[in-house]
Structures are given as C-alpha cells and as structure tokens.
Image (spheres, grey):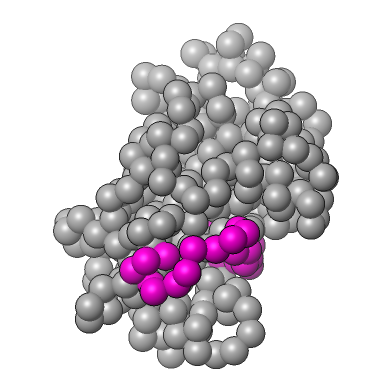
Amino acid sequence: MKLIRFGEPGKEKPGLLLDDGRRVDASAAARDYDEIFFGSGGLETLAQWSAENAAKAPEVDPKVRLGSPVARPSKLLCIGLNFRDHAAETNAPLPEEPVLFSKATSALSGPYDNVIIPRGSEQTDWEVEIAVVIGKRASYITETQAAEHIAGYILHNDVSERSFQKDRGGQWVKGKSADSFAPLGPFMATPGEITDVNNLAMWLTLNGEKMQDGNTSNLIFNIPHIVSYLSQFMSLLPGDVISTGTPAGVGMGMNPPRYLSPGDVVELGIEGLGSSRQNVVAYNP
C-alpha cells in the first residue's frame, strides 16, 4: 500500500494512492496515520479495508495538497555521514558507529510545500534521503528482528542550515529543525511495495541541474543495522521516523559551496518512493 495524507496543514486526512494513480479517502478505515494507528494493527485493518473498499472509496482531487504521509511522530531521528562519498566530500572520517542527530518534529512538511530559508540563514542546504517508519515498538532488538518493526519507507529531503549546524555550538539539531526542513512524501510505501530497499536509486536536482545521484546500496550502515542500533539507546515507538543519510552532492561539499536562495526549485526522488518538489522562499514573518 501507499499511504498519503491530504488537506490543509494541521487538517490532513488519511488516504491511499492506488496503483492506477488515483488518490482515495481512507478516513473510513483510520482516524490518522499516527502512533495509535501503527501500534494497534492499523496497517492490517487498512489493508483489509482497501481490498474491499478502495475501488469505490471517495476520490481525492489531484489538486488537493498532500501533507507528510505520517502524522507528527514522537521522534524524528537522523543518521549523518552514512554514505562513503558524502563523508569524503565533507572531509569527515568514516564513522565507526552511526552518527545520530534529531530534527524537531515541527519541521515536518508536505512533499510539495515551500522550503523556507530561516531568518539569518546563508547556508541552507539539501539532502535526499530514505526514511524508515517504525510500525511496532522496538527496544533492544537484533538486526534480524528489524524487518518486523518497520511499517514502511518515505522519501525525505533533510534540509539543513550548515552554519547553524556547525558554527553555533552544541547539537546538529540547531541546523536541522527550522519549519519546513523535513518535507516527507509524497507517500509512505509499505515494505511489500519495495523490491529491494538495499538497492534503490536516489537523486536530487536544483533548478533542473543534477546535484545528487546515489543508491541505497552505498549506505555504510544499512537499515536493519540502524533500527537495531537505535533501539539499544531508546525505545522506538510506532510512527517514529528515521532518516538514514544522504549521498554526495550536497551544497556544502562543493567548491565553492553552493546554497539555496529564494526562487530556487529542488526536486528529488527515490526509486519506488516517488518524487517531490519544493520551491525555496525567504522567511517572512
């Protein structure tokens, strides 16, 4: 299944993207795609409802806004420097363990919403990533157990303000958490929709120019390892989102560095997870 949420910000409803491209309202099967939904067998209920009702469910106009495919989770966790080529372009040594940071969940936005350059920013950057959605509480699990705790996968642009991240002291979260810095979607794909999550092409363009061209096969720490690793330090709750790292081609790694400006257009995609597009705008109080 491909889960979507549609409607105005803060008023999104659950839906499905069908194989024929139609969007349908799934409100009859779920209140929202949140911790309660994922933690109470919601995906199984939704699958049964879909098989019986999706073909005749109310259609959603393609012009209606798409929001993040999952409601605001308890945690939005990210792994840094998880591609060898990205570590090389930032002159960072390969990590011996996953580099963990977080993004504020208030950064979540829809796949076609604007990216807003924060007040005082001069180094807003882009990062195409595959994100994992937790489907069942995970605590001290093994890598072989990870798959049964995964609800699905989502395309994520891990937008970053590099000066806030690197020059302001403290955690990376400062440069990762501005409003609009976590566009997710257009949909969450359940695992059955993905042939091989360890071999998915991923790309990003800026104003039509290819910036990133990678593949999930080049992850230093693969998804089962990441899920198991994080579960050793905290309980991962249903609906939690984990973003797994970006390949080379970020603005910070260029010579000279290149960052986003108002008027830019970022487009990105991952094989099997669709594509998204964000217009870049200046902060306007």
User: How far across and down, in percent of the image, does residue 178 sit?
Assistant: 53, 74
User: In the image, is residue 209 above or below residue 260?
Assistant: above
Looking at the image, can residue 233 be seen?
yes
User: How far across and down, in percent of the image, does residue 141 sit?
Assistant: 78, 40
User: In the image, is residue 85 above or below residue 43?
Assistant: below
User: In the image, is residue 19 above or below residue 101?
Assistant: above
User: In the image, is residue 262 above or below residue 197?
Assistant: below
Q: Quadrant of residue 83?
A: bottom left
User: How far across and down, in percent of the image, does residue 58 sit?
Assistant: 51, 24
Q: Does residue 4 belong to the magenta stretch?
A: no
User: How far across and down, in percent of the image, does residue 259 sit?
Assistant: 30, 76
Q: Is 208 positioned to the left or the right of 235 in the image? A: left
**Front-most of residues 213 and 59:** 213
> From this viewpoint, which residue is outermost toward the top?
52
Residue at figure coordinates x 42%, y 42% from the top left: 216
Q: Does residue 108 belong to the magenta stretch?
A: yes
Residue at figure coordinates x 36%, y 86% from the top left: 122
Count of numbered circles in the view = 0
Residue at figure coordinates x 55%, y 90% from the top left: 168
Q: Quadrant of residue 63?
A: top left
Residue at figure coordinates x 51%, y 14% from the top left: 56
Q: Which residues are magenta?
A: 87-109
Q: Is 230 positioned to the left or the right of 69 in the image? A: right
Q: Is 77 positioned to the left or the right of 246 in the image? A: right
Looking at the image, can residue 4 be seen?
no
